[in-house]
């Protein structure tokens, strides 16, 4: 197939999948796993991002976006290890390429890795081929570091979902990952404010949005030191999205 035909075929596939998303008609796709084992069958695709976890009373998830970053990801990993908490890291492909050792550290600690685009653009502003490139390059960067790892989830930068984005995820066998608790840690309001915002919103099923890259994240780590052990003391347990 020549380049023009391949591009046309890719665009046709994405447009068709995007239309199916709008109608909520995505078919089931093979699941990915947080380990290197063969994944179990995955539920059918949904037309909206998954914003909560359904794993029982006081089960919640914590996620970290925009990394990995050499100044902040190790600190986040230390806090999580100290409290024996598993998290989900939504990684940017260009950062994965720069810091492959951090991706291995995340994986080796038992955390889940999700996609978060190649260069962190607002995917709603891109055409279907550009969206597909962002997704594909992101997955390729992760696969280069962890060849046997199968990525299951993808979070759109800025929460920028669209039919085109959903179509690209369907074509790549990914599920859209949203959140329900946003302490806006990226705005650096202070560690105490971040911690209080999480504490005030945390409830059964919550998916907490945090960041370990994309800017200075020392406040995020300091806040994590506060609210994470408090949540555990309150009976919350942390799970991966499923």
Image: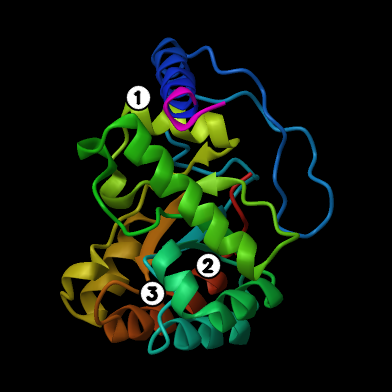
Query: Could you tell which of marks 3 and 1 lies nearer the N-terminus?
Result: 1
Q: Label 3, on which residue?
A: 212
Q: Is residue 131 left or right of residue 193?
A: right
Q: Is residue 164 above or below residue 37?
A: above
For the stretch drawn in magenta, the main secondary structure is helix
Q: Nearer the viewer, mark 3 or mark 2?
A: 3
> For mark 2, does the 10 Å Cα neighbourhood hold few (<14), some (14 to 19), or many (20 or more) residues?
few
Q: x, y (%) of residue 12?
A: 44, 17
Residue at the spot 40% in from the left edge and 13% down from the top edge: 19
Number of callouts in the render? Answer: 3
Residue at image point 43% right, 84% down: 225
Residue at image mark 1:
163
What residue appears at the point 62 percent right and 83 percent down from the top-left corner?
81
Q: Secondary structure at mark 3?
A: loop
Mark in the foreground, 3 or 1? 1
Residue pictured at 62% horizontal, 65% vertical? 144
Is 125 within the magenta?
A: no
Q: Earlier in the sequence, mark 3 or mark 2?
A: 3
Q: Position of residue 48 (x, y in %)?
A: 41, 28
**Residue 111 makes an appearance in the image:** no
Q: Please give the range of residues in magenta.
A: 1-5
Near mark 1 (Cα within 10 A), the count class, few <14, some 14-19 or many ≥20, is many
Left or right of 42, for residue 235 = left
Real-space CA distance between mark 1 and mark 2, rounded to the nearest whole angstrom:
39 Å
What residue is disc 2 on? 234
Mark 2 lies on a secondary structure that is: loop
Q: Give whichever of 45, 184 is nearer the camera.
A: 45
Q: Are marks 3 and 1 in contact (CB under 8 Å)?
A: no
Nearer the N terminus, badge 1 or badge 2?
Answer: 1
For residue 105, which quarter of the picture?
bottom right
Q: Name the quadrant containing residue 168.
A: top left
Local crowd at mark 3 within 10 Å, few (<14), some, or many (≥20)? many
């Amino acid at each position: 197939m020549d380049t023009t035909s391949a591009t046309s075929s890719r665009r046709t596939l994405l447009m068709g999948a995007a239309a199916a998303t709008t109608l909520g008609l995505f078919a089931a796709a093979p699941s990915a796993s947080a380990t290197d084992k063969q994944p179990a069958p995955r539920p059918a695709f949904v037309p909206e991002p998954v914003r909560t976890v359904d794993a029982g009373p006081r089960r919640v998830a914590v996620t970290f976006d925009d990394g990995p970053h050499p100044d902040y990801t190790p600190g986040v990993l230390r806090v999580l290890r100290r409290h024996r908490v598993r998290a989900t890291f939504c990684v940017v492909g260009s950062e994965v390429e720069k810091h492959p050792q951090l991706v291995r550290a995340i994986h080796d600690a038992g955390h889940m890795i999700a996609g978060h685009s190649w260069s962190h653009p607002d995917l709603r502003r891109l055409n279907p081929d550009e969206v597909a490139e962002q997704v594909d390059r992101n997955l390729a960067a992760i696969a280069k570091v962890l060849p046997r790892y199968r990525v299951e989830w993808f979070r759109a930068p800025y929460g920028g979902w669209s039919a085109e984005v959903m179509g690209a995820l369907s074509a790549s066998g990914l599920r859209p990952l949203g959140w329900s608790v946003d302490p806006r840690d990226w705005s650096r309001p202070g560690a105490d404010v971040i911690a209080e915002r999480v504490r005030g919103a945390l409830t059964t099923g919550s998916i907490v949005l945090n960041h370990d890259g994309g800017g200075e994240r020392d406040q995020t780590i300091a806040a994590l030191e506060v609210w994470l052990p408090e949540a555990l003391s309150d009976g919350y347990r942390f799970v991966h999205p499923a």
